[in-house]
Amino acid sequence: MTKRHQLFLALTIIGLLLAGEAAAQDRTCPDGGKAYFGYCPTDRPAPNVLQQQLEQWAFYPREVALKTAPDRLEQLYTNRDPQGLYEILAPYDRTTILATPSLGVALQDFKDAYYAFRQNEIAFEDQIFEKTGSLVTARMADGWREEVNYYLLRANGNSADQLKKGPQITLYLQMDEAERVFGLLNADAALNGQRAAIFIQRGKIETASAKMSQQIKAAATASR
């Protein structure tokens, strides 16, 4: 190939590249704007929404909006971080969660564990409610709920004197009757075993949540 042919071929290639670039520059983006060097902002991959939510929870857990827990016992916990993590994961399916880089399996395990934990608490409270109904003189279900609330507050470490002075019970609750029912329920070995198992399960949930927070923070910091 002569130098003239080489020069002609080079000029032809340059011309084609310039024509392609001009056509790309004329491209209209979905938002109505012009492409920049042939690319629109929408060409970039969308950010991982789940990953963003997890980082928000790990760095700013108090800013995560929480739903009202379906069981009273869960509402009494002061550490709400585990619930926040679960509520972030709850809407996502298994495939999406497992696709989270390096944390997918641990996140799915946490979601499964928290769901099982919540169901155990609900079943426990239902059992307390039924037993309370057989022990109290009140025949209205609302009255039973007040007794159940008192039992859970006492079982969660509050003394009778603390509850008398605090705002956690209603004025309609008869304290002597509530304390009597608590004593009977607290003497039930089977209920005590269930309650102890739930508290152990809760401890594992809180440990897993704290570990997950540290891992998410570390991963986010390393990627910056």
Image: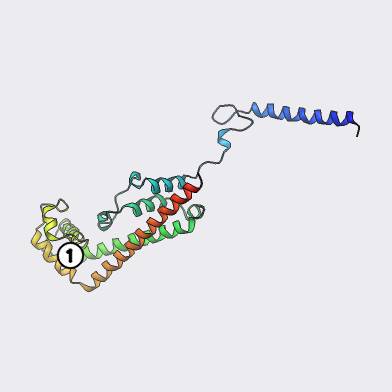
Is label 1 in a helix, a strand or a loop? helix
Q: In the depicted view, which residue is nearer to us: 163 or 188?
A: 163
Image coordinates of residue 48 in percent, x first then y, are: 49, 45
| Residue drawn at (30%, 68%) of the image | 197
| Residue drawn at (65%, 27%) of the image | 25
Q: Is residue 138 left or right of residue 192?
A: left
| Residue drawn at (15%, 60%) of the image | 159
Q: Is the image coloured rainbow, by chain, by secondary structure, or in one colour?
A: rainbow
Mark 1 Cα-neighbour bin, 10 Å: few <14, some 14–19, many ≥20: many
Which residue in the protein does label 1 denote? 132
Image coordinates of residue 151 in percent, x first then y, are: 18, 62
Q: Is residue 125 left or right of residue 208?
A: left
In the image, residue 39 sits, relative to residue 192, either above or below, namely above
Q: In the depicted view, which residue is nearer to us: 122 or 106?
A: 106
Q: Residue furthest right?
A: 2
Q: Is residue 105 left or right of residue 120?
A: right
Where on the picture, by quarter, is residue 32? top right
Q: Residue furthest bottom?
A: 189
Q: Is residue 24 left or right of residue 127?
A: right
Image coordinates of residue 195 in percent, x first then y, are: 26, 66
| Residue drawn at (41%, 58%) of the image | 110
Q: In the depicted view, which residue is nearer to us: 150 or 224?
A: 224
Quadrant that contains the N terminus: top right
**Total number of numbered discs in the rendering:** 1
Image coordinates of residue 211 in percent, x first then y, are: 40, 57
Name the residue type under label 1. Thr
